[in-house]
Image (cartoon, rainbow, N blue to C red):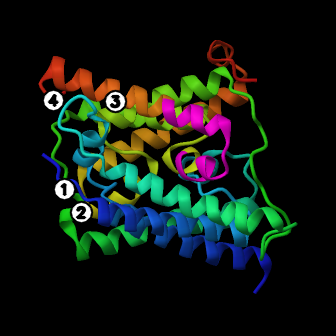
Amino acid sequence: MNPSRKQAVLAGLSGVLFSVGLVLGGMTRPGKVVAFLDFFGDWDPSLAFVMGGAASVYLATYLGAAKKRKAPIIAPAFHLPTRKDVDGPLVVGAALFGVGWGLGGFCPGPALTSLGSGSLDVVVFVAAMLTGMGIRTFLNKRGSIANRVTGTA
Amino acid sequence: MESFTPISSLIGGILIGISSALLLMFNGRIAGISGITGALLDRSTTSDERGWRIAFTMGLVVAGVAAAFAAPTAFVSTIDRSTLSIVVAGLAVGFGTRTGSGCTSGHGVCGLGRLSPRSLVAVLTFIATGALTVFVVRTLFGGSI
């Protein structure tokens, strides 16, 4: 198998496992997401266990194994973000994402996973989400006024 | 009303962590859904870059179809939202995650798991605005918007 096909197979398996984790964790229930974000109401802290569990496994792998390697197992190099500065687009983008997350009860992974449920609401959400992503890409290429407002280079 | 499910949520989280760790160790890539899927919408993404992204996204979707058959209750929505709200929410999630270089997975799992200060700021920001949104929807709109 050529390397890029190997990587695609691994990525496919990773996607399946990710999906199962989202479903078991409760992330595909918008009501559970909203209840997690409802700190001042009937708060359900369950989803903190999802993020905490996932980030802990990742941290152990990163510090214990990945950081000691020069390259990943089946790819020529690591592609990891190196930036450390906090800039406008990071904060504005995260803030907007949070509003959408609280309003719709979905972040990108669970929305894609939930397509299988056949819910029309999910299809509408995913279509709008992909449109939003596309608009960002389009604006990046145009170097438009909106970019200057949010500070994107 | 949602019940507290620490065990199943922790198990789900560990599976997500293992999935992301595999992608890091084998492919050297960040398991950030908005980045993986979003780059497919960019025409400048090369075909070499597309294969694994399509495979990951298809893995998510196909496993979701299987899960919907095996456990349909895992996908039940108990919140009351109009189609307009869902459209606005989807646009904000798509535009916001691509502007802020990540979502719950890229920043929340991989970023925090690499002790990235940018990701910590992003996570605190989207949880804060998410909580504020939920608070406003509940108090000003009676939970229905």
Q: Is residue B9 magenta?
A: no
Secondary element type, mark 4: loop
Q: Chain of mark 2?
A: B
How far apart marks 1 and 3 lie (CA) works out to 21 Å
Residue B36 percent coordinates (x, y): 60, 54
Secondary element type, mark 1: loop
Secondary element type, mark 2: helix
Q: Looking at the image, is B4 positioned above or below residue A107?
A: below
Magenta residues span B108-124
Whether residues under marks 3 and 2 lie with C-beta atoms below 8 angstroms apart, the answer is no
Badge 3 local density, few (<14 within 10 Å), some, or many (20+)?
many
Residue B105 percent coordinates (x, y): 52, 51
Whether residues under marks 2 and 1 lie with C-beta atoms below 8 angstroms apart, the answer is yes
Q: Residue at x 50, y 59 (%)?
A: A54
Instruction: Please give the label number shown on residue B143.
Output: 4
Q: Judge left or right: residue A144 versus residue A99.
A: right
**Labels 3 and 2: the sequence-earlier one:** 2
Instruction: Please give the label number shown on residue B131.
Output: 3
Q: Amino acid at mark 1?
A: Val
> In front here: A151 or A70?
A70
How far apart marks 4 and 1 lie (CA) works out to 17 Å
Q: Chain of mark 3?
A: B
Task: Determine which residue is flagged by label 2.
Answer: B74
Q: Looking at the image, is B105 positioned above or below residue A11?
A: above
Residue B2 percent coordinates (x, y): 17, 49
Q: Amino acid at mark 2?
A: Ala
Quadrant of residue A67 within the rendered picture: bottom right
Q: Main secondary structure of the magenta part?
A: helix
Badge 2 local density, few (<14 within 10 Å), some, or many (20+)?
some
Q: Chain of mark 4?
A: B
Q: Judge left or right: residue B112 versus residue B72.
A: right
